[in-house]
Image (tube, helix red, strand yellow):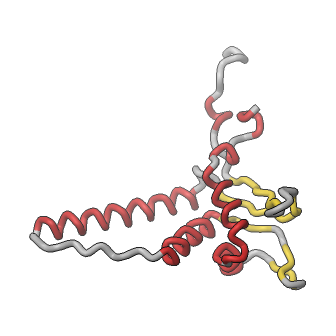
Amino acid sequence: MQDDVLDLASLDALDEAVLAIRHPTKDVPTGWTWTFYGPAHQVTLELADRFSRDALRRAASVRQAQVNGKKWHEEEQSPERLRAENVDAIVARTRTFSPVRLNGEELSFSREKARELLLDPRKAWLLAQVMAFLRDEQNFMPPSATS
């Protein structure tokens, strides 16, 4: 086999990636890190499957209502509920975060603490950084694949 032939496995997404949290105004590393499961990790795949099943179930309910001549009443989505659902999905993909202090008290990772932090409107900058990181699949590429 030739050395200059691409090995597709070298471009496979990593199972995990680390986000170095940056200061929201100074844009410098804070030393705080969050580790997330990658797009092909079993946790992420199960999450995507759950969302797909929910969407298919809703579509089937709409079709069933139409077939039976009934009106379909879409459940109204509130901004708070949508935000909570998004945060729940992020927390499901979160493996851990490094210890950090909050009001002088050390905070260790737990799913509940991660959810609390991401839902805190005073920490909207944190949610924005996390969402941007998870949206960019290059963050889960092996370093040699991006150079």
Horizontally, is 5 left or right of 108 in the view?
left
Identified at 65% across, 35% down, the residue is: 11
- Choose between 63 and 15: the one closer to the eye: 63
Q: Is residue 95 visible?
A: yes
Horizontally, is 9 left or right of 79 in the view?
right
Q: Is residue 111 visible?
A: no
Identified at 70% across, 47% down, the residue is: 139
Identified at 63% across, 46% down, the residue is: 137
Q: Quadrant of residue 89?
A: bottom right
The x and y percentages for residue 96 are 74, 67
Horizontally, is 90 left or right of 104 in the view?
left
Q: Quadrant of residue 98?
A: bottom right
The x and y percentages for residue 93 are 62, 63
Q: In the picture, which quadrant includes the C terminus? A: top right
Please say if 22 is above or below 3.
below
The x and y percentages for residue 22 are 81, 60
Please say if 6 is above or below 42.
above
- Choose between 141 and 5: the one closer to the eye: 141
- Choose between 128 and 94: the one closer to the eye: 128
Identified at 63% across, 39% down, the residue is: 12
